[in-house]
Amino acid sequence: MWMVGYSEGGEFNMADYPLCGRKLRPLMSRPVPIPVPTTSPNNTSTITPSLNRIHGGNDLFSQYHHNLQQQASVGDHSKRSELNNNNNPSAAVEELYRRGTRTPSAEQIQQITAQLRKIGKIEGKNVFYWFQNHKARERQKRRRQMFLVKMGFWRVLFSVGFGEK
Amino acid sequence: MWMVGYSEGGEFNMADYPLCGRKLRPLMSRPVPIPVPTTSPNNTSTITPSLNRIHGGNDLFSQYHHNLQQQASVGDHSKRSELNNNNNPSAAVEELYRRGTRTPSAEQIQQITAQLRKIGKIEGKNVFYWFQNHKARERQKRRRQMFLVKMGFWRVLFSVGFGEK
DNA sequence: GCAAATTAATGATTTATTCAAG
DNA sequence: CTTGAATAAATCATTAATTTGC
């Protein structure tokens, strides 16, 4: 019988995972995601306003893509799509993501950044971070959902906030 | 709204988390891990009986450590600890593991084996295999636990058998 | 309504893991 | 096995969004 606090050379340390301390809402069966008018009156701005609040820092992006060369010599500009999502940078990158872009190369990032710079102040590293985070969090979300589904925890699924947003 | 079957690149692999495939008890809140006498009457032999049943095979050990030389010339016999764990070879190596030994060198393996040979029939490759397997399985176990914990599924953890073995 | 308190979202960093080359 | 680059995971930090007590 192993305990929560059991640790052997840093095996499992409760304090290492603050995310886990997250409080769950009370477990209630909510079979159909009926829009409840009491809690949230209207979700108007559901589009994530990300990529707008950008704060400074060191350029980790260039750390990763230190081999940023003229690898676009021949140029595979097959699907540029011009990124014209009505001046919403987030919508633009989400469009790219939806179309399959996951880990854009340094050259791709440069192109995307160039397009987005027409809309607002942005750097390549911001685009880099965005794709990193978006990919990771999409996967995370999917894994959580898959896990619960495979476990058959429909109740947990609904209580966890499943179905909305 | 997302779908069950949605998958993008085979993210979640059930086989990677055999612990999760376990049948779950009905989801009940069990705030304190009270010892349940019905399921597991008594876990007396929780100490792994490994390193006692040794079967033959090719010597992978000598494959890896083909450079077994007198590298112990100067000798860093700082913490020998003599391995006197009351004639239990498994307890002995687990003690070493707990103290930090992960991938012992050929020379270390020879020393350990020499000590263990006082207790029973053993070869260097057995010790080598033990550390290989133990390291791998500890990591595996840790990953499984981390997975559930990081997902924040405490209830699942408990219902999944967390707390017993 | 409103403002403090809480929670969720997300950009930025840091740490760990994977994978290929030597 | 060791090393280094690339990636993924975890975490930190800050802000948006929501809840809650008046």
Image: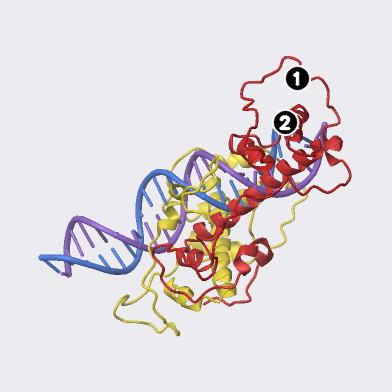
Chain colours: A yellow, B red, C purple, D blue
Name the amino acid, label 2: Gln
Residue plotted at (62% across, 21% down): B78
Chain identity of mark 2: B
Q: Nearer the viewer, residue A128 or B106?
A: B106
Q: Which mark is residue B18?
A: none
Q: Position of residue A43 (x, y in %)?
A: 37, 74
Q: Which mark is residue B72?
A: 1
Callout count: 2
Is A37 displayed left or right of C12 in the figure? left
Q: Nearer the viewer, mark 2 or mark 1?
A: 2
Residue plotted at (88% across, 47% down): B57
Asked which quadrant contains residue D21, the reply is bottom left
User: What distance separates the C-alpha of mark 2 from that of mark 1?
Assistant: 16 Å
* In the depicted structure, whether residue A132 falls above or below residue A8: below
Q: Position of residue B33 (x, y in %)?
A: 43, 62
Q: Is residue B106 visible?
A: yes
- Labels 2 and 1: the sequence-earlier one: 1
Asked which quadrant contains residue B91, the reply is top right
Q: Position of residue A34 (x, y in %)?
A: 40, 84
Q: Which mark is residue B115?
A: 2
Q: Nearer the viewer, residue B8 or B108?
A: B108
Q: Looking at the image, do the residues carrying marks 2 and 1 touch, with CB atoms under 8 Å apart?
A: no
Q: Position of residue C10 (x, y in %)?
A: 46, 57
